């Protein structure tokens, strides 16, 4: 039996429990090599993951705050236009991070997302209208990837006519799986950087509504976001909100396409959909792990002593299936309650888009199965290819016929 686990192998992605059990048998913290990240300590244990995510003093994102080189120094060979993006929320710590989050959190409030519901429904219905009904269609390309991209454009207030090109520029970011593919994303990032810098001025001039307007107008006393910070924030929203939500929706659909009775129950009682979605987040963990952390000092974690500068990553998929935390952790229970999974993270970096992601998945599930009760996979589920994308869990394609 192998003593290592490849988190991105089709076997693990399809059925992670054996791999997770093997990692658990080796301890709460285990050394592992992760793509792009390299060697790091990882944990599959819920309490250890939680302790790591909520101890912002001992664990930081920016290696410069843990005695290492700054991201700008580490990645000096990246083109200059990328450098402002290193100063985005996911890579910040301490007061810099709280300041940025304080400035933007209002824009992400539930009230704001509630106001977006009609737009999410409109975009969803349009995508469903456009699905061909007379032949096989890949839902990943034709729905699951499109909805989150359109919703982010709507959230930001990007004019309709600019959305196709923004989608084209941002999409390669969602295909990053190795250092080489990072380079494939650069031309799109270059163009989107140029577009957004000009757009911030345009929004200041015209007052075009949307999150960009709110972000450019944010004031906290004398504090406001610089154009570099605005750009980093907008890019973080695309990176944080696009593929993650794509695979939440995909995992919801795959579950229901394989369990017709559950799909029917949810149609009959839509009030159960939110619990179902939380269980998909827990059980399928579309986000398998977060960005890495660096220890700021000698610190105990998961029964080991870490040294300043050590790298450590919480495996959310492990925490979410921790048998010490969840009854029947390896079973999918559509009505599980309580369900305090970690798939949105927790602590100072907790996801800013939780309510938006939940709203999109709810509308997608309700509308798709209402419109096409006979929707079905055209291939056995175990022959549907798994996605190979760092840290994400979902399917690469979803071949369906929407009508019987
Ligand atoms: C199923 C959908 C989603 C999941 C599972 C998810 C999960 C996560 C997780 C685990 C983090 C913490 C990452 C870390 O610590 O490295 C995070 C951060 C973040 N998410 Fe989400 N996310 C989802 C959807 C969204 C959406 C729809 C948006 C916005 C439109 C969004 C925006 C962000 C941002 C900006 C951050 C960075 C927060 C920070 O570092 O302070 N996410 N998300």
Image: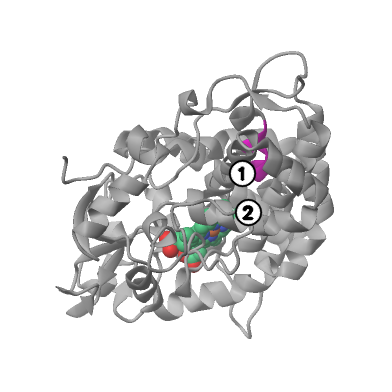
Task: Give how far across and how far down residue 177 sits, in percent.
Answer: 37, 38
Residue 206 at what x, y percent from top left? 80, 56
Callout 1 crowding tier (Cα within 10 Å): few <14, some 14–19, many ≥20: many
Q: Residue furthest top?
A: 134
As helix, strand or loop, the secondary structure at mark 2 comes to: helix
Q: Earlier in the sequence, mark 1 or mark 2?
A: 1
As drawn, the label of residue 252 is 1
Count of picture labels: 2
Q: In which quadrant of the rendered view does residue 62 lie?
A: bottom left
- Please tell me which residue lies in front, 373 or 350: 373
Circle 2 Cα neighbour tier, 10 Å, few/some/many (<14 / 14–19 / ≥20) = many
Q: Quadrant of the C terminus?
A: top right
**Callout 1–callout 2 Cβ contact below 8 Å:** yes
- Apparent side of residue 127 relative to residue 189 in the rendered image (left or right): right
Q: Is residue 147 rendered magenta in the image? A: yes
Residue at 27%, 41% (x, y): give it.
6
Image location (x, y in percent) of residue 382: 47, 28
What residue does disc 2 label? 277
Q: Which residues are magenta?
A: 143-150
């Amino acid at each position: 039996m192998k003593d290592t686990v490849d988190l991105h192998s089709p076997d693990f992605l399809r059925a992670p429990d054996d791999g997770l059990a093997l990692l658990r048998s080796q301890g709460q913290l285990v050394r592992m090599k992760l793509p792009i990240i390299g060697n790091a300590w990882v944990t599959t244990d819920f309490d250890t993951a939680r302790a790591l995510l909520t101890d912002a003093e001992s664990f930081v994102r920016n290696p410069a705050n843990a005695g290492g080189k700054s991201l700008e120094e580490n990645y000096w060979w990246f083109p200059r236009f990328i450098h402002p993006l290193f100063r985005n929320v996911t890579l910040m710590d301490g007061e810099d991070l709280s300041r940025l989050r304080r400035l933007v959190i209002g824009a992400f409030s539930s009230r704001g997302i509630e106001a977006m519901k009609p737009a999410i429904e409109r975009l969803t219905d349009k995508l469903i209208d456009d699905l061909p009904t007379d032949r096989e269609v890949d839902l990943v390309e034709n729905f699951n990837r499109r909805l989150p991209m359109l919703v982010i454009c709507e959230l930001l207030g990007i004019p309709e006519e600019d959305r196709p090109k923004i989608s084209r520029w941002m999409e390669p970011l969602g295909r990053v799986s190795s250092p080489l593919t990072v380079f494939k994303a650069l031309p799109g990032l270059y163009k989107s950087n140029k577009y957004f810098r000009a757009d911030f001025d345009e929004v200041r001039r015209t007052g075009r509504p949307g999150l960009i307007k709110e972000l450019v107008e944010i004031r906290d006393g004398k504090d406001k976001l610089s154009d570099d910070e605005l750009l980093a924030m907008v890019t973080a929203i695309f990176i944080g909100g696009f593929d993650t939500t794509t695979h939440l929706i995909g995992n919801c659909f795959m579950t229901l396409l394989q369990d017709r009775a559950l799909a029917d129950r949810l149609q009959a009682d839509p009030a159960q959909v939110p619990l179902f979605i939380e269980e998909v987040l827990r059980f399928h963990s579309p986000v398998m792990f977060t960005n890495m952390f660096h220890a700021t000092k000698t610190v105990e974690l998961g029964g080991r002593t870490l040294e300043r500068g050590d790298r450590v990553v919480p495996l959310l998929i492990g925490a979410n299936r921790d048998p010490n935390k969840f009854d029947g952790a390896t079973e999918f229970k559509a009505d599980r309650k309580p369900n305090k999974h970690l798939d949105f993270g927790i602590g100072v970096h907790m996801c800013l888009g939780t309510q938006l992601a939940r709203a999109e998945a709810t509308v997608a599930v309700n509308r798709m199965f209402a419109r096409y009760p006979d929707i079905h996979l055209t291939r056995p589920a175990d022959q549907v290819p798994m996605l190979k994308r760092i840290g994400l869990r979902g399917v690469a394609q979803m071949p369906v016929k929407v009508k019987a």
